[in-house]
């Protein structure tokens, strides 16, 4: 008579086998990191970062789609399908444009694995070319329409000759004044009236000594009373 395995032992072995199978299926793509931070240089138009990974499963993994949270970020994989043991990377390219500050963007990696799509996070710091203080000035409704000053200072190591200030509307008067050429300017803004709500952007144009054209903005408004 052939001895039979106790039912409890058989069940244990089945659970172990199922657990091992699930572990193999869940292991899939192993990422070196899922978050990256970087910083651009002055006048840099775009910047690239790469997320490295390897396929630790026992089956090929297919990249079905790469979705980004902004049109300013493009993402591509070096392959479409990764065999077991293969390494790969997702390369992300961020377009700087006229942005400044810190930006967080997300890449969603959709594969043919049964688990949820993987989210990759890119943080990009774009240094300001000029310090604008304050960025925005306001007047209360029916307040005396006095002149207010915005100060513009070139960032450390830069010399920007600002030459023009253009308002996007006619409700305010603007006057650009040079204090230290290439380094320090004052923008005087004055509403023609504060009797009703109004708002503008002021585009300041200049050129850095390296020859790069510069465009920065300040803002002015007489907001509705309910918004204050």
Image (cartoon, rainbow, N blue to C red):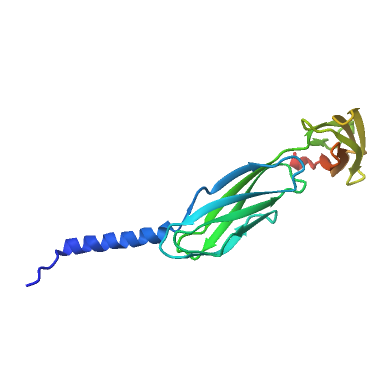
User: Relative to residue 93, is residue 162 drawn left or right?
Assistant: right
Establish if 108 lies above or below 41. Answer: below
Viewer-side residue, 174 vs 11: 11
Residue 97 image position (x, y, % from top left): 76, 49
Residue 96 image position (x, y, % from top left): 73, 48
Quadrant location, the N terminus: bottom left
Viewer-side residue, 195 vs 59: 59
Residue 115 image position (x, y, % from top left): 46, 60
Establish if 59 lies above or below 196. Answer: below
The tally of labels here is: 0
User: Relative to residue 143, is residue 59 drawn left or right?
Assistant: left
Residue farthest to the top? 180
User: Relative to residue 54, is residue 68 drawn left or right?
Assistant: right
Q: Quadrant location of residue 135?
A: top right
Residue farthest to the front? 86
Establish if 39 lies above or below 54. Answer: above
Quadrant location, the C terminus: top right
Residue farthest to the left? 1
Q: Quadrant location of residue 159?
A: top right
Establish if 94 lies above or below 57. Answer: above
Residue 198 image position (x, y, % from top left): 85, 44
Q: Residue at x 74, y 45 (%)?
A: 44
Viewer-side residue, 132 vs 63: 63
């Amino acid at each position: 008579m052939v001895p039979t395995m106790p039912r409890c032992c058989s069940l244990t072995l089945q659970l172990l086998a199922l657990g091992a199978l699930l572990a193999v299926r869940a292991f899939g793509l192993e990422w070196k990191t899922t978050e990256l931070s970087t910083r651009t240089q002055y006048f840099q138009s775009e910047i690239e970062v790469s997320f490295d990974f390897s396929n630790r499963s026992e089956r090929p993994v297919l990249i079905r789609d790469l979705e980004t949270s902004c049109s300013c970020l493009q993402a591509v994989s070096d392959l479409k399908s990764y065999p077991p043991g293969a390494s790969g990377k997702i390369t992300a390219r961020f377009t700087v444009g006229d942005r400044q500050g810190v930006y967080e963007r997300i890449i969603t990696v959709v594969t043919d694995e049964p688990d949820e799509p993987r989210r990759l996070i890119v943080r990009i710091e774009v240094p300001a070319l000029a310090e604008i203080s304050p960025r925005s000035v306001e007047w209360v409704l029916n307040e005396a329409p006095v002149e207010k000053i915005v100060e513009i200072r070139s960032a450390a190591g830069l010399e920007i000759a600002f030459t023009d200030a253009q308002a996007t509307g006619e409700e305010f008067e603007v006057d650009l004044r040079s204090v230290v050429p290439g380094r320090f300017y004052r923008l005087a803004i004055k509403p023609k009236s504060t009797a009703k709500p109004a708002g503008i952007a002021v585009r300041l144009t200049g050129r850095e000594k390296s020859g790069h054209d510069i465009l920065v903005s300040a803002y002015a408004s007489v907001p509705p009373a309910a918004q204050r």
